[in-house]
Amino acid sequence: MAFLAIFVDACILDGTDTGECTDPTDFDLLMPFCKAVVPYRACLPRYQSLWYNHSALSKDRFVQQMFTNLVTQRKIYETNTTMSDDDTDEWGGSRAITPRFTDNPDCENAFRNYFCWLSFPRCDSEGRSLLLCRSVCENFMTACQYSSDLWRCGDPKYVNARSAEISTTWVDQKLVYYRAPYPGSPFKDNAVDPDTDKPLVVCTPSLENSSRSLRAHALRPVLAFFFAAVWCILVKGP
């Protein structure tokens, strides 16, 4: 085990051991769906002999399956001629469905990036997995043409309300907010080197030319919540 530790670091998020920091050498085999957008050292599920499907490959397949299902279902709604002729949205309301994914590869790519970067966060030099960059959320909302009132890229204390939640509960010198966060939050702002204009590795993905701002390791239950929450956004109309 000590020998393996030389090559693999445990990735930690908020003090919790969540997986193993893994170099992208074998990503072709470990995560064929997400490999194209995860060229960095990433936090992957740690091997567990009692749970044979607890692996990067099974997680990657799960992400691919859920991504495909959600996009396919959304396109069915967007291209349904009966609903379009009746000026009816997917909820039966009297308004047309807003096309987001149909003939919009930018939206699909932003959606896929969101899933992959949330599922396989970047590791920093100390072996800690990094929070999702706020620009990833902003890029998804923009590419898929969501109106500003549907954006969920702010701080968790503003989620599900028009005003900030007022918290008086402190844990580990941090205020705790109880409103359900949007998947991926809290987000972290990107940062660049002022001399080179290159991105600093402060959040996931921190890659050049990827989801710039507009100026975890996550287990299956967390991913399921993510897909459910995003689905609620997807199925909304204008």
Image: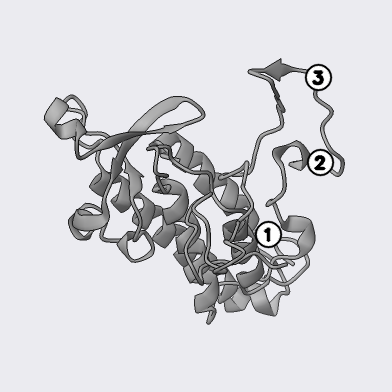
Nearest the camera: 13 or 104? 13
Local crowd at mark 3 within 10 Å, few (<14), some, or many (≥20)?
A: few
Residue drawn where x is 22% and y is 37% of the image: 53
For numbered disc 2, what is the local secondary structure? loop
- Tags 3 and 1 in contact by the CB under 8 Å rule? no
Question: What element does badge 1 sit on?
Answer: loop
Residue 1 appears in the picture as rendered: no
- Spatial CA distance of label 1 from label 2 is 17 Å
Instruction: Write down the residue under mark 1.
Output: 236
Residue type marked 3: Thr
Does 67 sit left or right of 214 as displayed? left
| Badge 1 density bin: few <14, some 14–19, many ≥20, Cα 10 Å | some
Tell which tag, 1 or 2, sits nearer the viewer: 2
- The correct choice, above or below, for 170 with respect to 29 in the image is above
Disc on res. 168: 3
Residue type at tag 2:
Ala
Instruction: Name the front one of labels 3 and 1.
Output: 3
Which numbered mark, 2 or 3, is in the foreground of this view? 3
Q: Considering only vertical position in the picture, is 186 above or below 196?
A: above
Report x, y in % for residue 190. 60, 56
Q: Is residue 67 above or below residue 3?
A: below
Residue identifier under label 2: 161
Q: Secondary structure at mark 3?
A: loop
Upstream in sequence: badge 1 or badge 2? 2
Q: Which mark is residue 106?
A: none
Q: Earlier in the sequence, mark 3 or mark 1?
A: 3
